[in-house]
Image (spheres, rainbow, N blue to C red):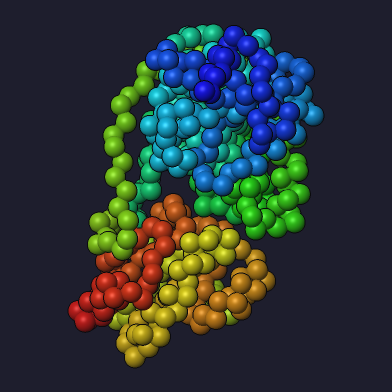
Amino acid sequence: MKQPRQPLIMMFGGAMLAASVGASANDVRLADGIDIPVAVHAASGDTLVLWLPSGIPGATPDAVLADKMRAHNIEVWRAEVLEARFLPALESSLEQVPDSDIVALIDAARASGKRVTLLASARAGLLALRGAHAWQTAHPRTAGLDGVILLHPNLYLGPPEPGREAEFHPVVLRTRLPVHVIQPEKSPWRFRLDALKTALERGGARVTVQFLPGVRDRYYFRADATPGEDAETAQLPARVRAGIDTLRQASAANPASKAPAAKPVATHKVVRGLQAYQGNPSPPPLQLIDLNGRTQNLAQLRGRVVLVNFWASWCPPCVREMPSMQRLKEKLADRPFTILAVNMAEPDKDVRAFLSKMHVDFPVPMDRDGAVLKNWKVFVFPTSFVLDGEGNIRLGVFGEVEWDIPEVVEKVVGLLSAGP
């Protein structure tokens, strides 16, 4: 019979985790009797990082990176909050984790006598901010939590309908702790950094940003990582150390303050697939130089049905859907139909190398500074819009689409049949 583990707040030894070099397995006991499994990568010094799970399947190197942080005098606790609640390792599961679970983890971490920093990536950033806010509410004006480090965070309520402005989760405007963002360049969130920083600062947080050129989101656990991404992964423990030091400076300049009361969060409904467009049908301007040096001006395509697709070569769903876009173009070769595949700020040579393998021949306008992406309110890669012959947006979708399947072709042909 399996023996229960001892609560972490009572002991700091234990059996070695098979997947974690130098980590001991312990638990944090919650008020409802549930135990949260925690892998403790012990280290000397006064620094403790509470690392929350990403909910992204395959994010296995967390244990390896946590162990390497010990060389920087960082003790890491990897808390398996999804496992504790019997939730699948999915980003959507993070919303079901009670804030009180994170409060209990922070309390247990502070009981070690070390200074605590939260670390989270992608959508788990919301779990970290929610938990930090709840902890501050339970411990008003209490020091001991230095701040939050966020890796390529997505702090929106969820992807909006195409063309609509996304809303930040309310906790973003209620965060009083310092926040340090580590943001890769090859990411849709790169173009939202200013908006994120402004929203956090409006709520009272002190925000610093570390920008990582040349790497993709999730670079530190990608199976297809480039040599540059491997090199950046090796630097991540040092970047976390620098982030902690930055947070501590901000904490010293702005001591702990009482967190404002939380507000209820409305359920965000995600609609998948190509749908009727609900936003302003008049599109923003789109005039860009394409990869072949030609000007592509959407305003000059009146009388044609136009598929405007926003993509990047480092975005797997973009790569998967692109061949079907070419097949759709070929199906409609004798009809007034055009594809504009707008590339997001990649070097020409990278785009040419990628397209040489894809064998597509539609125009690729180059949005070199992301200005068009912002104007079109693109929050997810890929995002696509279909315009009718009068130049109005009629269909939209975030995420990939198999463009040549019957139900999608039928919607596009319906616009062609309607005429200008």
| Image vertical order of residue 29 relative to residue 366, above or below | above
| Image vertical order of residue 310 relative to residue 215, above or below | below
Residue 22: x percent and y percent?
73, 28
| Quadrant where the image shows the C terminus | bottom left
Q: Residue furthest front?
A: 1
Q: How many numbered marks, from 0 up?
A: 0
Q: As rendered, which of 332 and 253 lies closer to the eye? A: 332
Q: As rendered, which of 204 and 85 lies closer to the eye? A: 85
User: Left or right: 117 with respect to 407?
Assistant: right
Residue at 48% across, 61% down = 317
Residue at 30% across, 52% down = 271
Q: Residue furthest left?
A: 418
| Image vertical order of residue 391 relative to residue 123, above or below | below
User: Left or right: 69 with respect to 61?
Assistant: right
Q: Is residue 376 visible?
A: no
User: Left or right: 76 with respect to 318?
Assistant: right
| Image vertical order of residue 222 relative to residue 346, above or below | above
Residue 258: x percent and y percent?
47, 12
Q: Is residue 57 visible?
A: yes
Residue 12: x percent and y percent?
66, 14
Residue 347: x percent and y percent?
65, 66
Q: Residue furthest bottom?
A: 334
Residue at 42% across, 62% down = 400
